Image (tube, grey):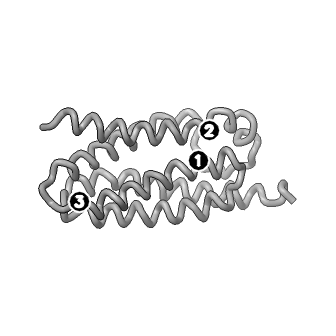
């Protein structure tokens, strides 16, 4: 086990989460808390622990790809794109207050997560499986994003 590569992979993913959360900190009490939300919206406190765990799993997944002997260039590009889309979503939704555009963006993020699962699978089955909770959560977040957008359309007119 290459502890250095493992720590770097986890750090990259957790830092992406940290960058995204910069947009959330001020927007949650000032904007997000005031939005209409569907009845299945989780309490705000759940998002931090869930995302921290997901970024950890993403980092471990990335580690398994990094230590493989396969050609990983395409896999790293696709992984990087989904990670960047992850950061941008927070900026679009929370900083720009644009849930409609954030919904469009999260669909692209979801597609790139699926692509990451597919390109990771031949390199490391474990790496691919570790991203399944992330895909499930982003699927749920997509639905939540859509409903927040729909429920708040009238208040923007």
Q: Is residue 125 above or below residue 97?
A: below
Residue shown at 43%/58% (left/top)? Answer: 81
Q: What element carries label 1?
A: helix
Instruction: Check residue 72 in the rendering and tell me which mark sits there, or answer none.
Output: 3
Q: Which of 134 and 22 is in front in this view?
A: 22
Q: Which of 24 and 37 is in front in this view?
A: 24
Residue 151 rendering spot, x and y as whole percentages: 74, 57
Residue 12 located left or right of residue 101: left
Residue 138 rendering spot, x and y as whole percentages: 48, 55
Mark before the other along the chain sequence, 1 or 2: 2
Mark before the other along the chain sequence, 3 or 1: 3
Task: Name the residue tied to disc 1.
Answer: 90
In the picture, residue 2 is in which quadrant? top left
Mark before the other along the chain sequence, 3 or 2: 2
Q: Label 2: how many residues lie within 10 Å, few (<14), some (14-19) or many (20+)?
A: some
Task: Name the residue tied to disc 2.
Answer: 24
- Quadrant showing the N terminus: top left
Q: Which of 52 and 17 is in front in this view?
A: 17
* Numbered disc in front, either 3 or 1: 3
Residue 47 rendering spot, x and y as whole percentages: 52, 39
């Amino acid at each position: 086990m290459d502890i250095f590569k493992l720590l770097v992979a986890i750090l990259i993913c957790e830092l992406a989460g940290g960058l995204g959360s910069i947009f959330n900190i001020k927007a949650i009490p000032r904007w997000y808390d005031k939005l209409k939300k569907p009845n299945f919206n989780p309490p705000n406190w759940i998002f931090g622990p869930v995302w921290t765990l997901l970024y950890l799993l993403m980092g471990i997944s990335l580690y398994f790809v990094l230590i493989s002997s396969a050609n990983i260039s395409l896999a790293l590009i696709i992984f990087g794109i989904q990670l960047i889309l992850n950061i941008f979503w927070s900026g679009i939704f929370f900083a720009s207050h644009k849930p409609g555009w954030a919904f469009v963006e999260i669909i692209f993020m979801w597609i790139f997560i699926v692509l990451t699962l597919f390109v990771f699978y031949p390199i490391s089955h474990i790496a691919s499986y570790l991203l399944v909770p992330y895909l499930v959560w982003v699927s749920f977040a997509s639905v939540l994003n859509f409903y927040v957008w729909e429920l708040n359309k009238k208040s923007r007119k």
